[in-house]
Amino acid sequence: MSRHSNIAHEAIVLSSQADIDQRYFTNFIDPTWGLTAKTVDESLTDEMRELGRASRRYYNLQDLFEDISCGLINISKEDCKKFGLDEDSFLRLIHDKLTPETIEMQKKLGVSHAAIRDVMGEGLTNWADREFALGRENLQNWQNSSKINSLGSAILDLTVKQQHPMNTLFHFANGLSASKFYK
């Protein structure tokens, strides 16, 4: 996905949740996890899509400021309305607060650090907390429903559970809010 933006022309484009989901499933989740499944002679399953959803949420949070600074808004129109965000709020964030130093600090500290939460404001902070909770739920759904159909998928299952970055982020965060854990 391109990180080019139209910020110079003061344009922020918000997409519907259906459009965002379609983009991610078509361009990222299905190709990535579908290829992974093929390497172990399996087919893409709904369980693997749960892992893909968790990955998407993780990377959206990890790259939040960088994406926004480029005009790439991975927050749906529906969520923007729910959390009090709009095109102007993203433009203000870009022009008033997102310096290269702030973007780098967010990548290092995560969305829960107090300094980052001050930059984000209440609406974006609440959205990030909700995304964290949903990502943890996606990962737990995958872990609880993952079925081992062959030796290949058993190896995949063990490998992903050991190495996936979401495992550390969400699996061990049961009962914790993003503000206490996410880094």
Image (cartoon, rainbow, N blue to C red):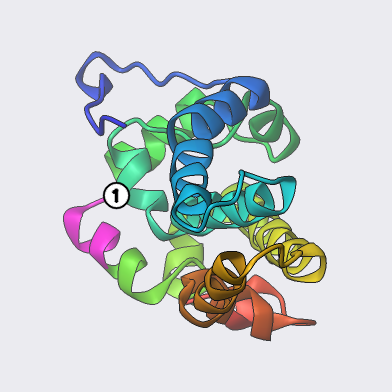
The residue lying at 53 percent from left, 69 percent from top is 156
Is residue 26 one of those drawn in magenta? no
The residue lying at 71 percent from left, 75 percent from top is 177
The residue lying at 19 percent from left, 62 percent from top is 101
Front-most of residues 147 and 26: 147
Q: Secondary structure at mark 1?
A: loop
Front-most of residues 168 and 147: 147
- Within 10 Å of the Cα at label 1, are there few (<14), some (14-19), or many (20+) other Cα atoms? many
Residue identified by numbered label 1: 98
Front-most of residues 88 and 69: 69
Q: Is residue 69 left or right of residue 115?
A: left
* Circle 1: residue type: Leu
Q: Is residue 159 above or below residue 86?
A: below
- Tell me where residue 37 appears, x and y as whole percent: 53, 51
Is residue 99 one of those drawn in magenta? yes
The stretch in magenta equals 98-104
Quarter of the image where one finds residue 63: bottom left
The residue lying at 64 percent from left, 32 percent from top is 80
Image quadrant in which the N terminus is located: top left
Q: Main secondary structure of the magenta part?
A: helix
- Tell me where residue 108 appears, x and y as whole percent: 32, 74
- Tell me where residue 122 appears, x and y as whole percent: 62, 54
Quarter of the image where one finds residue 76: top right
Q: Is residue 182 above or below residue 52?
A: below
Q: Is residue 23 left or right of residue 129?
A: left
